Image (cartoon, rainbow, N blue to C red):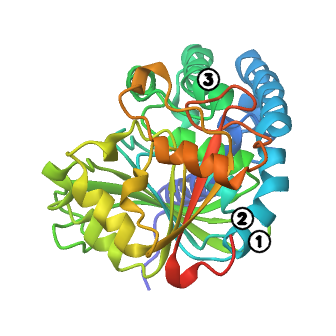
Amino acid sequence: MPFLPKPLFLFAFFAFFAFATAVRSAPSPDDEARFLAGLPVRDTPLEPLTLSTAWTEHAVVFDRAWAQLERRQLQPIQAWAPAALDHRYTDTTPVLYFFSGPDFLYAHAFFPTAATYVLCGIEPIGPLPRVEDLPPQTLAASLGTLRESLDTLLDFSFFITKKMRTELEDSRLSGTLPLLYIFLARSGCHIRDVSFTGLDPHGVFTTGRTLAPAVKILFSGPGGKDQTLYYFSTDLSDDTAGRSGFLSWCATLGPTRGFLKAASYLMHTGGFDTTRQSLLAHCDAILQDDSGIPMRYFPAHDWTIHIFGAYHGPIATFKQFPQPELGQLTALQKPAPLPFSVGYRWHPGESSLILAVKATHSTAP
């Protein structure tokens, strides 16, 4: 067996050692998520970066904002949802959250044990966040931009799409993936694997060109069970939805739950018929605010409707989409006020939710 000359042997040894050390010390996606979320990353390769003033200030601001969000929104949802949603709060049925952007936070708050979350929006995914590659002088600005892109969701429970897209495109931590990381980490989840994929026109996963690129995140929830999050960056209008493969793939998931919030009343117009029909066909139950599917598409012989909170009609921006039948149902059912805000009616006491349950599954609210 031939031996390497001593200088070459030493070079090879140290090269291998350096490579092994680099591989071993590479931050994991979970490390990256916790760092971005302003959470401790002790004993990880990112711990030295938390000594910077930029990260320390980021963590303080985020802790303060998150404590307010917990008190005002998340804890009331956790107290309200088990009785209001019954078994739908705790079962593992997949959740379809269309027009969501990267809002994993509320999907998880209302349905914390879903085996699979399918989020979809027009916002791009972006590359894998790698904070260790950021020039030190840009860290403060990058973290600040992330906080700014979350402002409306943390304050009002929804994203302003145009504002968020502009901020994310201008940041070194671009796309929706950093925000998904933050919501997962702050929801007590731990990321195990992240991969990029997409769908062909038949709804089959592909690595080729696609109208429905996606990121797939495997994670464990607070209870330790394995769960999966997909975020698809795709157009749900009729021009694209019928040929992207996205709705075809969703149909393969079996019975699902739908969740719609701050959906810009898009399915009240004529340009999203395919998406609306798909949700109605494949969801056993849909939890939504009034901006989701219009009430006229839930006939009484097919769906049972439960109203929660107070319906005050759409805000001025969407005044052309009133639903008098919702006001009538609210007067008939006399629901208690919601203890949290949701959708565009974010002032306390003004929000409402609709739980539509398919007739064969309507034995309980």
What residue is rendered at 17% in x and 61% in y?
242
Residue on which the image places disc 2: 221
Which amino acid type is shown beneath numbered disc 2?
Gly
Q: Which of marks 2 and 3 is nearer the N terminus?
A: 3
User: In x, y percent, where is residue 161?
Assistant: 41, 29
* Mark 2: secondary structure: loop
What residue is rendered at 38% in x and 65% in y?
279
Q: Which of marks 2 and 3 is in front?
A: 3
Disc 2 and disc 1: Cα gap in Å? Answer: 5 Å
Above or below, 141 relative to 82: above
User: In x, y percent, where is residue 61?
Assistant: 77, 21
Above or below, 224 relative to 175: below
What residue is rendered at 47% in x and 41% in y?
324
Disc 3 and disc 1: Cα gap in Å? Answer: 30 Å
Residue on which the image places disc 1: 224
Which quarter of the rendering shows the N terminus?
A: bottom left
Residue on which the image places disc 3: 151
What is the number of the mark on residue 241? none
User: In x, y percent, where is residue 254?
Assistant: 43, 82
